[in-house]
Amino acid sequence: MSASLPQDDDTLETQEWLEALAAVLDREGPDRAHFLIEKLIDEARRSGTHIPYSPNTAYVNTIPTAMEPPHPGNLELEARIRAYIRWNAMAMVVKANKHNPPDGGDLGGHIASFASLATMISVGQNHFWHAETEDHGGDLVYFQGHTSPGMYARGFLEGRFTAEQLDHFRQEVDGKGLSSYPHPKLMPDFWQFPTVSMGLGPLMAIYQARFLKYLEARGIAKTAGRKVWVFCGDGEMDEPESLGAIALAAREKLDNLIFVVNCNLQRLDGPVRGNGKIIQELEGDFRGSGWNVIKLIWGGYWDPLLAADKEGILRKVMEETVDGEYQAYKANDGKFVRDHFFGKHPKLLEMVARMSDEDIWRLNRGGHDPHKVYAAFDAASKHVGRPTVILAKTIKGYGMGQVGQAKNPTHQQKKMELESIREFRDRFGIPIPDDQLEKIPYFKPAEDSAEMKYLHERRKALGGYLPRRRMKADEKLTVPKLDAFKAVLDPTAEGREISTTQSFVRVLNQLLRDKEIGPRVVPILVDESRTFGMEGLFRQIGIYAPEGQKYIPVDKDQVMYYRETVDGQLLQEGINEAGGMSSWIAAATSYSSNNRIMVPFYVYYSMFGFQRIGDLAWAAGDMQARGFLLGGTAGRTTLNGEGLQHEDGHSHILAATIPNCVAYDPTFAHEVAVIIQHGMKRMVEDQENVYYYLTLMNENYPQPGLTAGDEEGIIKGMYKLKSHGKGKLRVQLMGSGTILREVMAAQELLEADWGVASDIWSVTSFTELRREGLDVERHNLLNPEAKQQVAYVTRQLAGTEGPIVASTDYMKLLADQIRPYMPAGRTYKVLGTDGFGRSDFRSKLREHFEIDRHFVVLGALRALADEGKLPLSKVSEAIKKYGINPAKANPQHA
């Protein structure tokens, strides 16, 4: 709402200024008027006058009636088609919830959200949204998640879905149904993007629009003319992710981005801003961030009243009325609106004196007026230089009558009684007789009807049907062979030590030099390049910046200076993990959105990866993303100086929850190279819908190099690294990441101090081992008379001797995943880093978490004792020998 003004001490002078402004508007137009006003404000401020700024405009439509372009479509046909879609969407949800299964559970569903958005979806489908063709890459539309029934209902008219599929809304297990929300994983040829959880759609879309500009700047794809449309709810804008990146969109001038905020004034439980005005609030947020804002508040039936409002009383009441009141108006009737809205001022009552209650009830909101919607969409699609947001006022549950329109419980409404269904039918003129109403049949006109011909013609003119998703890219790329990474496959020279982070950087540099794959590599970092030793990329490939570099960097005299460039390859997101992940998702799904295979590598501070952006990581799985996530400075004890909030001991647990995330915790450089090369073959050459997570450590040590034949074990998740000792007693030692080095040291101690021989197994992925074991279990369960399979872990350990001890830098649960696949009768002990992290030297941290070489030895001796192969006194002896304090706090609780 506008800032309060001081009292007018000279009304005549005020009138003269207003008349002058009116003359400029009449003769030279609004642009000239805007220029003059800005010059006046600037001059006043320079002279010391305090003029407070308000980002808000009046509570009326941004586009004046006189400036609205004519609607080019057949409004009568569009209205009928829209009515049929509304009916079928409602019928689908209501019919799904008429089932009474034995468990008594409802399927749920939402009618009201699409009911409020139907007109805007209709206008977009008929006039604005291009499908992918040879000449146009296609527009990308992020549909509001709860409006999915409307997209299915339209798809039914288009012939893309059958009535049987609509009957199976939210009944997907048997393969006939339609997913509750937009889910590319479940409907891979239909939905382009998942937009739930709420807030993720707006965030991902901003970086998607940016990535289109990136592809154009680098000459990889022609994306000019393509738009990213984002439909979101006004309640959804309270999610921090929804508004978190809007400044970036303005800063990078993403004029290919259009937000449409469906301001139906209601969220799940009640009004979005009962005591305020969400449209005005959002206008301030977006305009203050540099967006072009189009307010679409009032429909055409208000135009005569607003034109007659010479004293501004109507506008003043509109401004002062809060959203809770506006919600109540549309939940009641015309008389209620007359009494409670127009009744706020006698002149307003006089203004509507000749209007019936029905006339007043017909006064519509902008989001339901196809003329106004077309004007707003047209202006947004033509705007240059800034992203646009359309704030469209609608009614939640529009047309649902007394059962649901503008009611607080409307969002959850999924059932309607017969009388409400009849009212809905009559409201939208659906040609279904009374004796059929109880069955709630779908309605589809004859294929040769005017409506159906128009429906198909409009989409044909725009290139085809939307939403539609490409499942594979047309292009074929070949990844480098493994021997291309010889620099990290060979052992390090004597006295030379490197970390797995350094080895990854070497692999990445080799990929960047590859003529075919190199241009498709997208390195993404979030202000941690120097942490990972990747600042060399600044000069080598440049940081993407749409305006280039307008300054001389302070480190220009250095070899690895900070270099921004228009065609830069590196995406440097600032301190912004969610933004980095959103850029990664855009690149990782480019094969689908842009028909271009990209290979993104998002390297981040491990603790601030899955823990912080877990919802986006899950969405990436839904979107069938392909690429690499790399958790740098990983492990609870490897990043020794940072402390509790920085030390990751659980990212692999979180990664394991995402079915198509393939997670590895490699120890050595050669393992990193083998995993990345194999992952690229799966994702790039085979176009398999998986993505990879690798943890990288900043601890330096000698690298043993690849032994031929170990490649398969590295990929499957474990291989025998080293055997040592000839004693009668033997144990199997397993480890991953840097803690494998402690296991290797424990092997020496076991032989030297206790005469125990051992085999060491490098476990690159406990998660992959478990998944393979689960596959075996399931096969054996469902095929009891077939040859029974044996899990890979079991096969590897079956011919070995002794108990098995595993130690990692992660929670015990990570290694515990494979406990069911231990050979029968074998003891399995797991060490891990359960508990909060803390700051100290690595050796102290590993002692604290009881995962160091001494505790590996202790675990092995105890396992031997438990199997009756050693006296328990040997365990006590080891505790004393290694100075272990039995009274020390349990790290899980410390």
Image: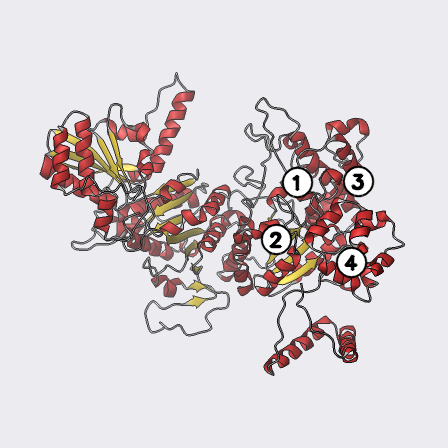
Pair 3/2: label in front: 3
Q: CA distance from mark 3 to mark 2?
A: 30 Å
For marks 3 and 2, the one nearer the N-term is: 2
Q: Nearer the viewer, residue 765 or 415?
A: 415
Mark 4 belongs to which amino acid? Pro
Residue 232 at least partly seen: no
For marks 2 and 1, the one nearer the N-term is: 2
Residue underneath mark 1: 409
Q: Quadrant of the C terminus?
A: top left
For the rendered model, the colour scheme is secondary structure
Question: Element at badge 2?
Answer: strand
**Quarter of the figure with residue 805:** top left
Question: Element at badge 3?
Answer: helix
Q: CA distance from mark 4 to mark 2?
A: 22 Å
Crowding at mark 2 (Cα within 10 Å: few <14, some 14-19, many 20+) = many
What residue is at 35 percent from the left and 71 percent from the top? 555
Pair 2/1: label in front: 1
Mark 2 belongs to which amino acid? Trp
Crowding at mark 3 (Cα within 10 Å: few <14, some 14-19, many 20+) = few
The image shows residue 472 at horizontal and vertical percentages of 51, 43
Instruction: Say above or below: 553 vs 784.
Output: below
Residue underneath mark 2: 229
The image shows residue 725 at horizontal and vertical percentages of 12, 35
Residue underneath mark 4: 70
Q: CA distance from mark 4 to mark 1?
A: 37 Å
Residue underneath mark 3: 427
